[in-house]
Image (tube, rainbow, N blue to C red):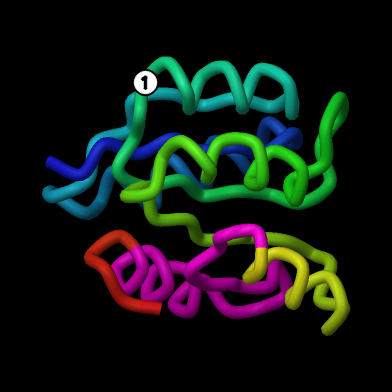
Amino acid sequence: MIRTVIIEDQTAVREMVAQVVRLDPQLEVVAEVGDGHEACETCLRLKPDFVILDVMLPGLNGTEVLRRFSKQLHETRVLVFSGYEDPMLLRELLEAGAHGFVGKSAPLSELKRGISVVSRGGS
């Protein structure tokens, strides 16, 4: 099983992403969090295989969350799922350790594809 943490501050979006993840029998949701500080603590404690990360979070933003846990969790795969599609932000996220990006304006099929590819080692 690919242990998955979903980090998204909007409850409805977080629940939708969790439902999409649960459709894949190889993925297991081990935590859902909506705050940047809690996200760091959760990832460092649970050491997930895969993280779906929003960028705009209360507490710490997604880039800072990624920087903090990716230094210690080198094997954790990260898919950023965000409504912010600025090229500079994307570059920051990739430099911080993200393996993929799906914009929230993309079709649901694109999110499913991103989850499948990144959770299994692709970019």
Q: Quadrant of the C terminus?
A: bottom left
**Residue 3: x %, y % from top left:** 26, 36
User: Does the magenta segment cover residue 29?
Assistant: no
* Left or right of residue 83, residue 117 in this image: left
Q: Position of residue 51 (x, y in %)?
A: 46, 45
User: Which residue lies under the disc numbered 1?
Assistant: 46
Decide: is 30 above or below 103: above
Across and down, in percent, residue 12 comes to 66, 37
Residue 97 within the segment the image draws in magenta: yes
Q: How many marks?
A: 1
Q: Nearer the viewer, residue 12 or 100?
A: 100
Judge from the rendering whether residue 85 lies leftward or rightward of residue 33; answer left or right: right
The residue drawn where x is 46% and y is 36% is 72
Depicted 12 relative to depicted 58: above or below: below
What stretch of residues is rendered in magenta? 96-118
Q: Quadrant of the N terminus?
A: top left
For residue 53, side relative to residue 118 (left or right): right
Corner quadrant of residue 69: top right
Q: Tell me residue 34's x, y (percent).
A: 69, 27
Which amino acid type is marked by label 1?
Answer: Leu
